[in-house]
Amino acid sequence: MSGHTSESVTIRMRFVTPAFLGGANQSAELRTAPFKALLRQCWRLAIAKDFEYDHEKLRTEEGLLFGHAWLAATPTAQGEQGKTWHMKSPLSIAVRSAGKLSLMDQWPKDARIKHPEVKFLIGAHLYLGYGPLEYDKTKGTVLKSARKAIAAGAEIWLRVSGRKLADLNPGLEKVLSLLHWTGTIGGRSRNGWGSVELINMKGIDFSPSDPAHDLANLTQDYTACLERPWPHALGRDDHGLLCWRTKSDFPNWEKTIEELARIKISLRTSDYFRFPSNSTGQFSSRHFLAYPVTKHSVEAWPREARLANQLRFKVLKRGEGYLGVIYHFPAGLPSHLTKSISPKDFQKWQREAWKKVHEILDREGVRWK
């Protein structure tokens, strides 16, 4: 592609699981912003290795491609620092429904599953979708009042065009691979909601193969990943990619989500990640998985401290069936949080905690090789 001509790529996407996309009234409005954010996230992971994982260089290039309000101008010849400036993205991104957008305002019945830390059975969908979903005493798991969700099976067109598309194109196949195999969008998307798949493309010759093949060059040893406090690669260890699928296919997305909920509960409540009886207010292994944790805060951390779950769930359509997939995009804890954790062998602790996660997932699922 030429950098001086306007080119375009049009992607037809299908929702494999319901998506909690909002708008001012949380009515499943189809907006460009979350799709641009998804493209941006996939681009960052696809291109990070080319920048030797230098987040400053990567951030600058990302701003020039997707728009920014914070880059600093080049210092003047007199040595004066340039002022910050802003620019809109030279890429044009548009999204529209492929036909009438299918919405849902009623939720299907989900299975009740056991959680060792809760006295009663809980809804599997509710466990992975709490927020957009809630519990109703008479109906069980339901969509929050007045909310709607984009239904599984709904299809959209995503169009990317503009003079800078040539700058995106060298890594575009990597971006599309990440989008197809790992892409989710909307509320609770790391838990598999809003899973999307690519079903048709115009303007580029690209066809997904399988995750182990398409994502193999976007990996790094997970212990090296933990040295940087931001997700920049799909992890790998001595056994291969940190990518697991459910042991069996399922007839629909509902059952697949239920299995992912079961696996997540099994992981978080395993012996290794249970909170010690005397750990009130202290950092524990469980906090590596995500933070905050209900009723188990870290006293030394600020109230606004947040750690996103490094494990990302996805539901894939395969033939007439569905598969649940789990990826690990490893990253270390930010320095402003680790400085309040006392053990001198913290890095060893962190590596061992994630090694334990991988062992549990090897037992609960199957490595995608």
Image: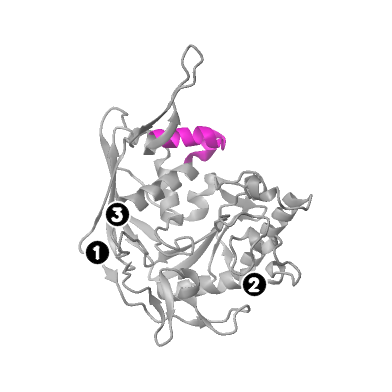
Q: Which residues are magenta?
A: 47-64
Residues at circles 1 and 3 in contact by the CB criterion of under 8 Å: no
Q: Is residue 293 magenta?
A: no
Marks 3 and 2: in contact by CB < 8 Å? no
- Left or right, 253 with respect to 100, comes to right
The disc, 1 or 3, on the residue closer to the chain's N-terminal end is 3
Identify the residue under disc 2. Answer: 269
- The amino acid pointed to by label 1 is Leu
Name which residue type carries label 2: Thr
Q: Amino acid at mark 3?
A: Arg
Instruction: Tell me which numbered mark, 1 or 2, is placed earlier along the sequence.
Output: 1
Left or right? Give the position of 63 relative to 269. Answer: left
Number of numbered discs visible in the structure rendering: 3
Residue located beneath label 1 in the image: 101
Q: Which quarter of the figure is the C terminus placed in?
A: bottom right
Residue occupying the far bottom of the picture:
138
The secondary element bearing badge 1 is classed as: loop
Q: Nearer the viewer, residue 80 or 130?
A: 80
